[in-house]
Image: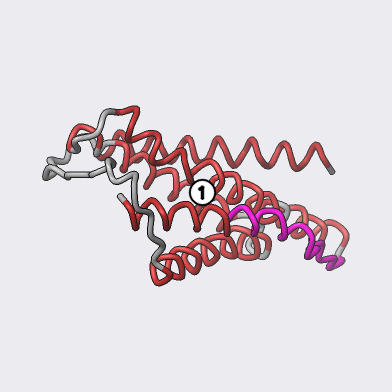
Amino acid sequence: MKELINYYSLISILLIGFGFILGYNSSLKFERDYIEICIENYGDFSFNFHIFKTIILKNFTVAMLISLGGYFSAGFLTLLVLIWNGFNLGTMFTLVPYTNLSFYEFLLLFIIHGVFEITALILFSNIGLKGFLFFKNVVKNNRIQIDLRAKTFIYPSLLLFFSAIVETFLITNF
């Protein structure tokens, strides 16, 4: 089972990467307005609960779509959502020349919370991609056996929760 989790993680990373390349390349041709981003407000940190609530609800909606939706669609929804998220990420990186930030600063804003969020989504996608085995078992053995355990949702949920906290601090303060 560990080999499958690693295999599913690799598939997830490749799908996000594929979406990133599509998003980056397709967005290069669009002209954008200049975006001023201020990252010098290091002194007073605040936390906006409304922003946190919005982020956490959206992130968990995506997580449930990737995991449960993917599981019960033989992994199809998982594939679509991972490519779409990679596409959006690639599109965001085409904004770098239109900001006052260097590529390094822009990358740091994403990495600070993105490492946790992307890792959580990859773990959720491992659940969704196992849906292929669920449907294979139904077709091949004519037997329905749902293999969803609550403990497989705990670690990625905690990562997603932490990521939402960090993202809220970034949005609220920068």
Q: How many marks?
A: 1
At label 1, counting other C-alpha atoms closer than 10 Å, the crowd grade (few under 14, some 14-19, many 20 or more) is many
Residue 164 position, x and y percent, is: 50, 57
The figure's colour scheme reads: secondary structure
Q: Is residue 1 left or right of residue 41?
A: right
- Badge 1 element: helix
Reply above or below: 79 against 134.
Answer: above
Give the quadrant of residue 134: bottom right
- The residue sitting at 55% across, 50% down in the picture is 79
Does the segment drawn in magenta span residue 159? yes
Which amino acid, by three-letter code, is at mark 1?
A: Leu
Residue bounds of the magenta highlight: 143-160
- Report the front residue among 153 and 28: 153
- The residue sitting at 73% across, 37% down in the picture is 6
Give the quadrant of residue 1: top right
Reply above or below: 79 against 99.
Answer: below
